[in-house]
């Protein structure tokens, strides 16, 4: 089933919170973070916060321990493993960073499920301090997208993924996300693709303003159980060569507002 490419956002999609906020809050630096937030871009601020953590004696192991207890719905782990077992090509496009994401995925034993992780670089320097750099060098080569933050245009990343799979005409993309940064890539999906916005989150609200701007079929989800059920329904429908419209009445408008039928999947 390699004809299906499933692209996940990370924060509030795979894990059930923002990993940046989680680390800062759990290590007791949220007051400093909130004070500095109006003064610099988010990505730059996170690099600054890692410097502050280091200067106050917080170690890489302290950060790892916090990341290993980040909240995640267990059905999301099952959904990832199931999609991978079915032969889907799983990828991540996230505005977090490589260190946070890889640490969490390794702890959950699902890192090997993903063929590619597109995110901000994060690495440990010679002083044993975590550095976080922007995905796009916005000072020297800005991406120019007005919908996205300066450090990352997810729409540009999705186009690169689309170009890399363009040789296979049967390739279809399922994109899952929650934040406003997931709107730009949603706009760039094709009519054979699927977008799964998290209900009552920023990307869902943006799509709701005018769903007809989205070429892909829209299928909302609210929690880990719905993410698992709907994503595996779509994968099953695609693999059977059936129309995904059978999942709900109207892919352009109704599916973003109406609840999905409770379909019992054979593997559960």
Image: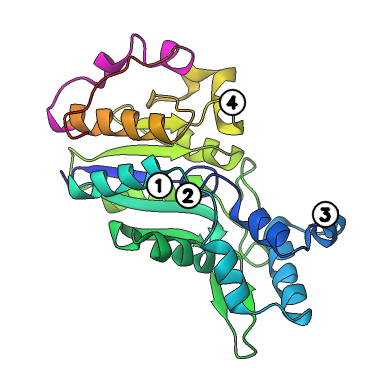
Q: Which residue is mark 3?
A: 34
Q: Quadrant of residue 217?
A: top left
Q: What's the CA distance linking mark 2 and mark 1? A: 5 Å
Instruction: Give the crowd class for mark 4: few <14, some 14-19, many >=20 residues within 10 Å.
Output: some
Residue 82: image location, x then y, percent: 24, 44
Left or right of 164? Residue 2 is left
Q: Is residue 242 visible?
A: yes
Q: Which callout, 4 or 2, points to the residue nearer the camera?
A: 4
Who is closer to the viewer here, 238 or 59? 59
Left or right of 136? Residue 29 is right
Number of numbered discs present?
4
Mark 1 element type:
helix
Please report the residue visible at 23 percent of the width from the left and 34 percent of the height from the top.
Answer: 235
Please report the residue visible at 13 percent of the width from the left and 26 percent of the height from the top.
Answer: 241
Q: Which residue is mark 2?
A: 156
Instruction: Give the crowd class for mark 1: few <14, some 14-19, many >=20 residues within 10 Å.
Output: some
Q: Which residue is mark 1?
A: 159
109 part of magenta stretch:
no
Q: What's the CA distance linking mark 3 and mark 1? A: 34 Å
Labels 2 and 1 touching (C-beta < 8 A): yes
Q: What's the CA distance linking mark 4 and mark 2? A: 25 Å
Residues in magenta, as a range: 239-257
Q: Which residue is mark 4?
A: 200
Residue extending farthest left? 240
Residue 228: image location, x then y, percent: 34, 35
Labels 1 and 4 touching (C-beta < 8 A): no
Residue 138: image location, x then y, percent: 65, 61
247 part of magenta stretch:
yes
């Amino acid at each position: 089933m390699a004809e299906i490419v499933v692209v996940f956002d990370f924060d509030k999609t795979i894990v059930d919170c923002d990993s940046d906020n989680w680390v800062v809050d759990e290590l007791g630096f949220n007051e400093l973070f909130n004070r500095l937030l109006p003064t610099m871009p988010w990505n730059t601020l996170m690099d600054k916060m890692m410097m502050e953590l280091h200067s106050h004696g917080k170690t890489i192991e302290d950060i790892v321990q916090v990341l290993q207890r980040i909240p995640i719905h267990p059905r999301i782990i099952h959904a990832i493993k199931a999609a991978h077992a079915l032969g889907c090509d799983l990828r991540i496009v996230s505005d977090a960073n490589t260190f946070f994401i890889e640490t969490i995925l390794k702890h959950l034993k699902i890192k090997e499920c993903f063929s590619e992780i597109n995110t901000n670089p994060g690495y440990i320097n010679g002083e044993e301090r975590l550095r976080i750099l922007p995905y796009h060098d916005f000072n020297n080569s800005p991406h120019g997208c007005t919908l996205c933050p300066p450090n990352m245009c997810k729409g540009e990343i999705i186009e690169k993924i689309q170009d890399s799979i363009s040789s296979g005409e049967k390739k279809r993309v399922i994109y899952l996300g929650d934040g406003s940064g997931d709107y730009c890539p949603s706009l760039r999906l094709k009519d054979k693709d699927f977008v799964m916005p998290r209900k009552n989150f920023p990307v869902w609200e943006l799509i709701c303003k005018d769903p007809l701007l989205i070429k892909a079929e829209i299928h909302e989800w609210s929690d880990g159980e719905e993410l698992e059920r709907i994503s595996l329904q779509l994968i099953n429908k695609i693999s059977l060569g059936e129309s995904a419209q059978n999942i709900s009445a109207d892919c352009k408008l109704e599916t973003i507002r109406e609840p999905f039928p409770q379909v019992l999947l054979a593997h559960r």
